[in-house]
Image (tube, coloured by chain):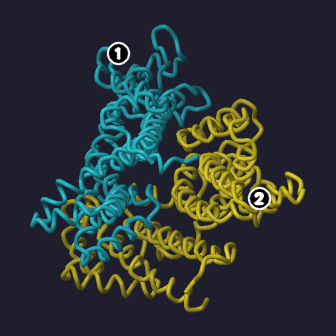
Amino acid sequence: MSEAPRRSWSRRLLSNRNVVAGLLILTVVVAAALAADLVSTHDPRRLDPPSRLSPPSAAHYLGTDEFGRDVWSLVIHGSRVSLAVGLTTMLLTSLGGILIGLVAGYYRRLDLPLMRVMDGLMAFPAILLAIALMAARGPGVWNVIFALSVVYTPRTALLIRSTVLSIRETDYVQAARALGRRDLGVAVRHILPNCVGPLLVQGSFIFAYAILAEAILGFLGVGVPPYVPSWGNVIASGKNVIREAFWVSLFPGVALTLSGLSLNLLGDGLRDTLDPRLRVP
Amino acid sequence: MTAYLVRRILALVPVLAVVVTVVFLLIHLIPGDPVSVMLGPDATPAQIQATRQALGLDRPLPEQLLKFYARMLRGDLGQSYFLDRPVTTALLERAEPTLVLTVSALLVAVVIGVPSGIVAAARPGSLWDRFLMLSALLGVCVPGFWLSLNFIYLFAVRLGWLPAAGYASLLVDPLAALRYMVLPAVSLGFSQSALIARISRSCMLEALQQDYIRTARAKGLSQGTVTWIHAFRNALVPVVTVIGITTAILIGGAVVTEIVFNIPGLGRLIISAVFRRDYPVVQGVILVTATAYVLINLVVDVLYVFIDPRIRYE
């Protein structure tokens, strides 16, 4: 198997259809979140009881909900919560995963206890553990991020640990250690760079899981507070009026699906490009 | 085999110990004083003190943890304040709907997933293969709870074919139970069928490339025999693992599905417990589901040995 030259890395990435499609959709979602105030037509929190449950029209592109809030503006603003929670969870799980994975892979004495703790955390169905953590901490954006980071860090830790284990026996790491480099130096200079690829792949999937999980928690009423416009909260309020106004739950769900699709495409594409061995045929 | 089983069961001990510790620590994650949070703003200091003593929260942390382990070993999950009964009783009362839902969804997932994956693998690259794999991708991305709402709108509100929500026990009224269960089971099982389809397809593709398949074809066996008798059985091993993973995901998904369809199972129990700050019930539900997950994986590992005689269990 020939090693592709470093130069073509970004070009190979951009010649992958999945990556391009994923990036395109993601760009639209990010743009909507950044320009939310410009793109939305109404204040998403403004109640307007007289025009409650109006179907999609020129005044309300995607209709209104049971309080007369504009669904289009709610969906646009909801992308902020979703992306913020997804991105922060991805960053925190990567940090936590790197830390735990490096320690476990490097110090054999800590490996077993750390891995048993990770196994124990992964024994809980993800969404139930998140619900229980939310029960203890109470509603709020940071509590959602905390809960989801606890839930998803073990997967990243396992990934980093196995990468570390396979790298630490290679000749160049042995050589660096023989030259007297400290553990931390070896870890940062020689081992971490090898983790970047797997981390990016895993990161896009965790981003997708976190967005979905945030919406589920919001839908169940245990996520961000109900007055915050988030996709899960809007879908939950749409559930109560599904007989009269299907549009309230329909459109935030479309946004949720598209975001999940973009990150899954991106993750699949990154995996195919960065590590062809992991490719699902 | 017995030695293998014993070893596998012993390996569960540390994992379950961690599970119990996490469940224990939950109370201590409550910001501020857990007891005043539990009892609400109307509680008097005397009540708070009494409850704190009753829960043992006035003792040092290690002592509390040891007592908690001891209680769990006795199967005592505590008392639900709101429901006014032991948590184990509450769990047992609510277990049936969740169990029925999870098993039905698993059936749906396997019945849709395995055949679609195999048919796709039989002609890789065909239109059918691409269509299936596209639906599998969509199945992964479409949120199950949102799909449920759309199903309710289409099949219950618009077409009126099925009830929008509710539950009937299989033991009491099997026909009604079936009607109530169709939508929840399909919407929960659908997204998992996508995962199962992807895995069965890739396992089947791998199995079809083996030498013994060529031999079987060379012997003049029909395409159907080769696919279903020779390749299928060998593709089954990884699929069984995935079904194990799927069951765990389904237990989590069942919680959400129960809320959508108003099914009185463990999911509804934990969500109402969250709103009532009934922490022993929250702890009980996650403890039981995590234990179920661990046991399901044990069963899957053991099944493995039976399906694939090449796997040794020394």
Location of residue A278 in the rendering, given as x and y in whole percent from the top left corner: 48, 50
Location of residue A29 in the rendering, given as x and y in whole percent from the top left corner: 38, 26
The chain ID associated with circle 2 is B
Q: CA distance from mark 2 to mark 1?
A: 58 Å
**Quarter of the image holding residue B54?**
bottom left
Relative height, residue A194 to residue A85 (above, below): below
For the residues beneath circles 2 and 1, the answer to whether they share a chain is no
Q: Residues within 10 Å of mark 1 (few under 14, many from 20)?
A: some
Identity, as a three-letter code, of the amino acid under mark 1: Val
Residue B158 shows in the view: yes
Residue on which disc 1 sits: A39
Query: Which residue reaches farthest top?
Result: A58
Identify which residue, B31 or B249, lies in the foreground: B249
Q: Name which residue lies at 85% across and 57% down.
A: B218
- Residues under numbered marks 2 and 1 in contact, where contact means CB atoms less than 8 Å apart: no
Q: Name which residue lies at 34% across and 44% down.
A: A200
**Quarter of the image holding residue A75?**
top left
Residue B276 shows in the view: no
Q: Which chain does the yellow colour mark?
A: B
Residue on which disc 2 sits: B213
Which colour is chain A painted?
A: cyan
Relative height, residue B70 to residue B277 (above, below): below
Q: Residues within 10 Å of mark 2 (few under 14, many from 20)?
A: some
Identify which residue, B140 or A254, lies in the foreground: B140
Location of residue B266 in the rendering, given as x and y in whole percent from the top left corner: 53, 62
**Left or right of residue B244, residue B73 in this image:** left
The chain ID associated with circle 1 is A
